[in-house]
Image (tube, grey):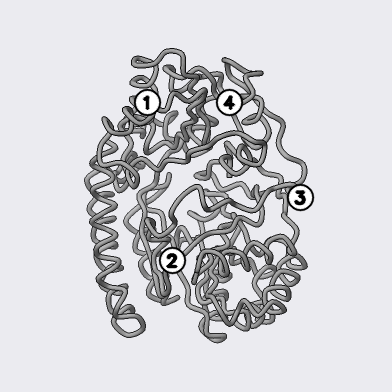
Amino acid sequence: MLGTILRKAGHTVEAIHETEDYKNREDLILRIISTKPDVVGVTVTTFNCKSARELCRQIKEKSPAITVACGGPHTSALGKDGIAYPPEADIWVVGEGDKIILDIADGNIKGGIHFPDQLRSLDDTPMLDLTLTDIRKFSGTYPQTRFPSMFIMGSRGCPFSCTFCSRAVFNRIPRYRKPEALAEEAEKLITDFGVREIFFHDDTFNMRLEWVYSLLYLLRKKNLHKKVLFRTPCRVDKKLVTEDLLEEMKATNFWLIFFGVENGNPEMLKSMKKGITVDEIKRAFSLCHKVGIKTEASFIIGMPNETLKTIRDSEKLWRDIKPYWCSFSRAIPFPATEFYGIVKEKGHLLTQNFEDYQLNMTLVRTDELDKDTLEREAQRLNKLAMRQKAMNLLRAHPYQLARIAGGMIKTRLRGSIGK
């Protein structure tokens, strides 16, 4: 997106995904130094913050004249507390970078922490220029049925208050792109880039039902539902998931809906401020099964107040709702979340250094459960879920097993590179 904005403004741009485009860090540094760019922008997430910091250090060490600008969820979260991370950079953007990126590229901003105003409207959000990368290098989000897969963000912001969720970049005010622009972008992805699966990667796709219905109508009007499969995340709220909506989504060739279930215990859902009930969860999955849309469920293991009983409640709910795809994630106390503040105050945070964070790593304990117990339960449940995933793929998409297995191996290799 940022590359698209810069290119439209007349700047020469190169977009790099390090682990896909370069075999090692040395080759990337050599490419940067030899290109002599005015600015290098680095996206910083919590899981890649150590690697991103090292990249910034190496760039400044070998070419001090290059301006290094950082943004993304980790930089934004720490920046809200006035922390400039990574410290080796020159510029830190806290929040959305759509407008400030032009001031940085034009040389109007040369250093410091900056807090750009949140975009009030997404009407001017450009259609992604995918010539900046090769989407065939990327597997897309599992599970897949068609390849290549690409995402579209139709909205930004989430008004809900889940304690574990970071809103460091997009904040809480939902803003929507016009359905006409989204349908046009979907058509371009299909026609120009041969995309066969589109993931509407919104925080809450079904938050504004009138907007969803308009988008579904336009996708069908352009006959895109006959050329591509769609998928998206939704909330399970009774007022947001109706049988009529699911039938419309099914008619538009939405094949899978992701639901953040998080826990099977009512009190845990309340303490997580999820804003949903177990009955709503069961209802949403039942309606999807009835309509014929596959489902994905995400659970979290290790949130405050978690016990063996609440974990068993989550396991029981998983078996009851019968999702096509499921994961049991370790609770991750991301910076600037309410969850992080709770575990830090209780002394349940097992590391104070965000650079130690790794995916699939137990980082907290609870009042009743220690690290080893939580890790054992997470591994046990994920093994059960993995078996179910394999069975579902054998029944529905057996040719995907090899691709997913290869992708998981590749993901692990990336993780070892980033450590």
* 224 sits to left or right of 199: right
The kind of secondary structure element at disc 3 is loop
Q: Residue 109 carries which label?
A: none
Q: What element carries label 2?
A: loop
Residues tagged 2 and 3 counted as in contact (Cβ below 8 A): no
The first of marks 4 and 1 along the sequence is 1
State which mark lies toward you, 3 or 4: 3
Kind of residue at badge 3: Asp
Q: How far apart are marks 2 and 1 (CA)?
A: 32 Å
Q: Are marks 4 and 2 in contact (CB under 8 Å)?
A: no
Type of amino acid under label 2: Pro
Tell which tag, 2 or 3, sits nearer the viewer: 2
Instruction: Point out which mark residue 148 bears.
Output: 2
Q: Residue at x 58, y 19 (%)?
A: 113
* Quarter location, residue 4: top right
- Front one among 350 and 291: 291
Residue at 26% x, 54% y is: 410
Q: In this view, does 90 lie above or below 197?
A: above
Q: Nearer the viewer, mark 1 or mark 3?
A: 1
Q: Do the residues labelled 4 and 1 touch (CB within 8 Å)?
A: no
Say which mark, if any, is on residue 34. 1
> Relative to the observer, which residue lies in front, 358 or 350?
358
- Say what amino acid the circle numbered 1 marks: Ser
Mark 4 highlights which residue? 80
Residue pointed to by mark 3: 123
Tell me the quarter of the picture where residue 116 sits. top right
Q: In this view, does 46 lie to the left or right of 2?
A: left
Q: How far apart are marks 1 and 3 (CA)?
A: 37 Å
